[in-house]
Image: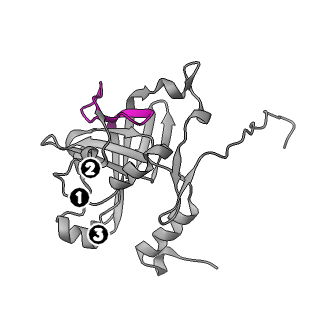
Amino acid sequence: MQVKPSELKPREFYRILISAVAPRPIAWVSTVSKDGIANLAPFSFFNALCGAPPLLGFCPGIRAREVREVLGSPVKDTLQNIRDTGEFVVAVVTNDLVQPMNLTAGDYEASVDEFKLAGVTPRASQMVKPAQVAESPVNFECKVYQILDFGTETSGGSMVIGEVVAANLAESVLVDGCIDGNLLDLVGRMGGNQYSRTTDRFDLARPALDTTVK
């Protein structure tokens, strides 16, 4: 079976993408509006992009039509805040934070503070204005490196690339000063409403350099 994006509605091919490209890490992104209102929202089009400079990227999509009609703008508050201020924080999502994270995934008026809505604790950052999620074991303070826009105002999205200016790590997930993956109970996003846990892990060494292979 071959499926061509040109023959489907964008939302239909989107469902294929998110079901097949999985599990995806979740960026729990905090921002502050130009009026000082805190915002917190999750994004699963997210990953680390480069080590030097240290870059993270996530992709806020355009709001659904029915949401645009109610809230009056196709642009999500997270993206608008980042365009206005150039700063954001990415917190990782552990299994015990799944329910609060899901609460912040809703569409709300820009005046809503999702930290309060989800019952999580804002902790002051040192290098940027947006707060960290205190309950998350890893928070990356970021400044905008580049924003790429795709598609149209009604079908598309943007890629926000941020340079990490500080990483805040909980002692509870560190061994000899490094993050121990066995101590992080991270979750990933699958297709639809499905999520996954990273509890089933294994080690696999990369092949050594072999110059005899032609």
Mark 2 vs 1, N-terminal side: 1
Using a 10 Å C-alpha cutoff, classify the residue at mark 2 as few (fewer than 14 neighbours), some (14 to 19) or many (20 or more). few
Question: Which element carries disc 2, helix, strand or loop?
Answer: helix
Residue 100 seen anywhere in this rendered image of the structure: yes
Judging depth in this view, the residue of 102 and 211 nearest the camera is: 102
Amino acid type of the residue that numbered disc 2 sits on in the rendered structure: Leu
Q: Is residue 17 left or right of residue 113?
A: right
What is the image's colouring? one colour
Calculate the distance from the C-alpha at mark 2 to the C-alpha at mark 1: 10 Å
Q: Is residue 208 left or right of residue 12?
A: right
Mark 3 vs 1, N-terminal side: 1
Q: Residue at x 53, y 76 (%)?
A: 4
Identify the residue position indicated by label 3 in the image. 154
Q: Is residue 120 left or right of residue 36?
A: right
Mark 2 vs 3, N-terminal side: 2
Range of residues picked out in magenta: 123-144
**Foreground disc of the pair 3, 1:** 1
- The N terminus is located in which quarter? bottom right
Q: Quadrant of residue 107?
A: bottom left
Indicate the position of residue 31 as horizontal and vertical percent values.
27, 42
Query: From what the image shows, is residue 44 above or below residue 49?
Result: below
Residue 149 seen anywhere in this rendered image of the structure: no
Q: Are marks 2 and 1 in contact (CB under 8 Å)?
A: yes
Amino acid type of the residue that numbered disc 1 sits on in the rendered structure: Tyr
- The C terminus is located in which quarter? top right
Judging depth in this view, the residue of 202 and 10 nearest the camera is: 202
Question: Which element carries disc 3, helix, strand or loop?
Answer: loop
**Foreground disc of the pair 2, 1:** 2
Question: Which element carries disc 1, helix, strand or loop?
Answer: loop
Q: Quadrant of residue 210?
A: top right
Identify the residue position indicated by label 1 in the image. 108
